[in-house]
Amino acid sequence: MSVSLDNLCVHTITTKPWGLDTAARKYAAAGVKGMSIWRDAAQAFDGSIKAAGQMVRDEGIDIVSYVRGGFFSALEASDRQKAIDENKIIIDEAAELEAPLIALVVGATPGQSLFESRQQITDGIAAVLPHAEAAGVKLGIEPLHPMYADSRSAVTTMAQSNAICDAINHPYLGIALDVFHVWWDDQLEEQTRIAGEKERLFAFHICDWKDQPEDMLNDRGLMGEGVIDIPQIRSWVNASGFSGYEEVEIFSNKYWAMDQDQYLEMIKEAYLKTV
Amino acid sequence: MSVSLDNLCVHTITTKPWGLDTAARKYAAAGVKGMSIWRDAAQAFDGSIKAAGQMVRDEGIDIVSYVRGGFFSALEASDRQKAIDENKIIIDEAAELEAPLIALVVGATPGQSLFESRQQITDGIAAVLPHAEAAGVKLGIEPLHPMYADSRSAVTTMAQSNAICDAINHPYLGIALDVFHVWWDDQLEEQTRIAGEKERLFAFHICDWKDQPEDMLNDRGLMGEGVIDIPQIRSWVNASGFSGYEEVEIFSNKYWAMDQDQYLEMIKEAYLKTV
């Protein structure tokens, strides 16, 4: 169980009603030490992306990751090239923010197999990695739940993520593990261990899977509200050598509709009690 | 591609607005040869379950499976015993219907690991198999999509289904493969081959996974409407030795709301064109 907030990071999308400046001020006042910044939040900031990063740091908040790059697969080669170009821009934005990591939602393309999409994803990531390394920004493949395999992510498991990392074998490429997406996988412990051995577990995202969610996207639960044994997964993550931020990433129509100050208190409480 | 309707079976829930007698009459008139009967449809029939089976056969329709048994896991041993008792009743109903197979949705229990639930499921199935064999009714484990791992099915893959079948090793226990649940799994081809080798692939369910469904339960697509390569999966299923009915099982608020005669024609058309 967490005894302090020292490792607590919150994603801007978790408190979506707040702009980036409000979020930074509120997180700082609440004792939250880390923030992962979504692209929409950075772009909506009244000022440059560089200034956005400075503003957040001036509040005493660490920028943990920039969310998100990816969507590398496409039926047409020209569209795959567009994705590569777009990801280079995202890498440049992360560098301006001084975010050390980009979480990748890798994409999937109806009309071709997941194997084909994963090959294109591998090629796309390999194509942008030199740019990422030059910018000092790492990339973390985030395997998504198989319910998003239609058009969001052909990568649904830690094993597939490890396989892509093995194929590319670059120190700037690793994995972002989100309990929501991989909790059901009986290879999770073993594949997390492997990711740790290869020093590629770059990020750890938390929330909960509610018993029978009402919505495929926006009904995630607070830690402790659902069926995921987060302490168990956290123990595997820590045993693998990861000791970085625990990032609270919750999409929830229910929580976005409530008072966000009160919600941030609930997040802290759930974090201290359950993670 | 299918050149006839000879292997087409439709689940009563697919045309939910119709009662069992209407469904049997309409399927027969449309040239559908097989029907899988859901428990609610059998129980709502105006007459005994035995009479329901006779009525369907009198229309010239084969009864392919009875849907569904399962839900074996529970925190308390007394509840697990209740599930065993209930499954024996379901087996008796299937025998009265003269249905050769029961599809099992095996269950999952919040508050314990999926590993623990799978052990309880294994024990529960083993406990009812002698009753099933005596009744002449086979049991098919239906792995469900991981989005149902919270409380519906701790068995999410063909590999886990094969593992349970290996552990129990009984000729009346096999697997019901539904493309909706397992299409995303990169072990599908291999595990289907293994199921075939061991003569335990008992049923093949078809529908489609739409690109970004609106609902976790009731927005399944007609074959060809989504992202699943059904001919590919069908080729694996056939290569494994399966040559039985292809069972159309679609939960869809959209299709239930339309004229069911017209919908049945669409099912036939989609079957002939896509499967």
Image (tube, coloured by chain):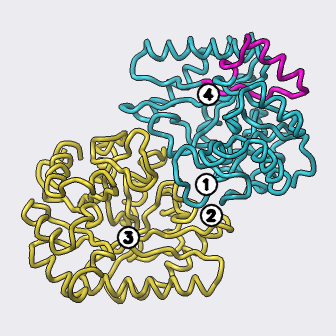
Chain colours: A cyan, B yellow
Residue B45 percent location from the top left of the image: 23, 81
Residue A266: % across, % down: 78, 50
Q: Is residue A35 left or right of residue A217?
A: right
Q: Which residue is mark 3?
A: B103
Query: Is residue B219 shown in magenta?
Result: no
Instruction: Determine whether label 2 and label 4 are within 8 Å by CB.
Output: no
- Can you see residue A20? yes
User: Residue B257's spot in the image, x, y percent?
Assistant: 26, 55
* Precedes in sequence: disc 3 or disc 2: 3
Q: Which residue is mark 4?
A: A167
Q: Can you say whether B154 is above or below A181 in the image? A: below
Residue drawn at x 21%, y 74% as measured from the top left: B20
Q: Specify few, some or many for label 1: CA neighbours under 10 Å numbering under 14, 14-19, or 20 or more.
A: many
Foreground label between 2 and 4: 2
Secondary-structure class at tag 1: loop
Q: Amino acid at mark 3?
A: Ala
Residue drawn at point x = 9 percent, y = 72 percent: B60
User: Do the residues bearing badges 3 and 1 touch, measured as CB atoms within 8 Å?
Assistant: no
- Marks 3 and 2 sit apart, C-alpha to C-alpha, by 20 Å
The answer to which quarter of the image holds residue A141 is: top right
Which one is nearer the viewer's eye here, B156 or B51? B51
* Image: magenta residue range: A42-69
Q: On residue A184, which mark appears? A: 1
Q: Chain of mark 4?
A: A
A185 left or right of B157? right
On whether disc 2 and disc 4 are found on a single subunit, the reply is no
Real-space Cα distance between discs 1 and 4?
A: 25 Å
Q: Do marks 2 and 1 both belong to one polypeptide chain?
A: no
